[in-house]
Amino acid sequence: MTLKYLPLALVASCLLSVSAMAKQAPSFDEADLKVAAELRDQALNSSLDYEIVESLTTEVGPRMAGTPGDAAAVKWGVAKLKELGFDKVWTEPVTFTTWKRGVEMAEVIAPYPQPLVITALGFSVATPEDGLSAEIIQFDDLDALKNAPEGIAEGKIVFIKNRMERARDGSGYGPAVAARGQGASQAAAKGAVGILIRSIGTDSDRMAHTGMMRYDEGIKKIPAAALSAPDADLLENMIRRGKPVTVKMTIGAKQGGEYTSHNVIGEVTGSEKPEEYVIIGAHLDSWDLGTGALDDGAGIGITTAAAKLILGLPERPKRSIRVIMFANEEQGLVGGKAYAEAHKDHIKNIITAAESDFGAGKIWRIDSKVKPEAIPAVKQMAEVMEPLGISYGNNQAGGGPDLIPLRGKGISVFSLRQDGTDYFDYHHTPNDTLDKIDPEALRQNTAAYVIFAYLSAQMNGDFGTGFHQK
Ligand SMILES: [Zn+2]
């Protein structure tokens, strides 16, 4: 090539890359943006989302993985999706080991005998049948326990007193919950015979918060439970007096056998590219203490109602929309892992995904994890959500717990961030019940999800793939 022709070649290559860019950047038709706004307004005038949560909490109630409530919830999900007229409804198997809660009691034996309110943590082993009595050794948080000298807790019950911070985005949960997940093995490594943690929550009700814990391999399994916040205060006050505090805890929990539950899936089948689909989901299981209204009945109501609005349009959207009711999220994202494994050869068909699993508070922000060229389209989507009080945040979305396994396979995801200021007052407690849901806030969520699902199904172009977030 001579110098003479270089400028022309440069211009040509620039033109080519501009048109390639334009091809890659997704966009929405004006007509679709209009329909999305209409769907939004319909959602704000419908109580279907609330009716669905009311139905689930009333007719099924607690539905911990592997219990009769789990089986009832799967049956309920299939019947509900069929009743609502989804084009396809099916289930996919999800197999896991079960855990059963038994008796759970605790009391201070000395120096000031009185009862304590506790709940066993998920997958805790039992104490001896007639209980376990030992002196308490207190730690400020998990790190303090980790950094303590070897053998410091020999023969004692470890008490971790860390408090979770209240925050709109729930950011206090991550740092606090480590004590629940890892506390038992860390305590056992220092010689402890049991562990009590302050509940991972933000309330001061005399109710304890359950949740999953895990034993490290090769370390003795010791019984683990959470104290209600006021009982953790009580224990702190006793310890402050300087005398040894002895507690008796009795836990009858045990591991059960294998069980097969099901992810329940309802599809709005696309008219042009039915094999391509958008996932909106929530988890169908709950803990056993409450009726799982906020965690995650709300998500089931929001996503199912959003898809039902799209079913009501005169024409099916171009791509399919799948509502996935994931099995057993609480005990290890088991349903999410099963879905990702079952569909691993068709990951490219998943256009994008979002899970609603943060209660029923209003959404205030939409975050994406998409290719950079797609961000202008996401902002356009956010504009349709603006009347709902939602604005665009950033391109670092996580998508939701059950999407972690799919995210690891590279799909794009969205996070419709809810106000979680009060969420951890009720999370994993007997107090997670229907009355905590504000129907108006729930409708605002459904309105946002219907915009997300519809526009993603109609979009020209794509959000990209290959993100492989861990
Ligand atoms: Zn949840």
Image (tube, helix red, strand yellow):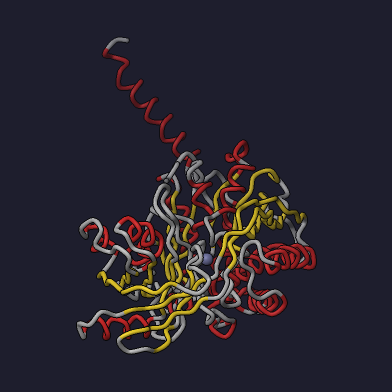
278 and 293: which is toward the camera: 293
| Farthest front residue in view | 130
Residue 438 image offset from top left, x and y in percent: 54, 83
Query: What residue is shown at x 59% (from left), y 66% (from top)?
Result: 100
Residue 327 image offset from top left, x and y in percent: 63, 58
| Farthest top residue in view | 1
Query: What residue is shown at x 41% (from left), y 31% (from top)?
Result: 17
93 and 162: which is toward the camera: 162
Residue 326: quadrant of the picture: bottom right
Up-down relation of residue 366 to residue 116 (above or below): above
Query: What residue is shown at x 46% (from left), y 82% (from top)?
Result: 207
Could you tell me if residue 387 is visible in this image? no
Residue 244 image offset from top left, x and y in percent: 25, 79
91 and 449: which is toward the camera: 91
Query: How many numbered circles are shown?
Result: 0
Residue 193 image offset from top left, x and y in percent: 38, 64
Query: What residue is shown at x 68% (from left), y 74% (from top)?
Result: 56
Up-down relation of residue 444 to residue 262 (above or below): below
Q: In which quarter of the image is the N terminus?
A: top left
Could you tell me if residue 330 is visible in this image? yes
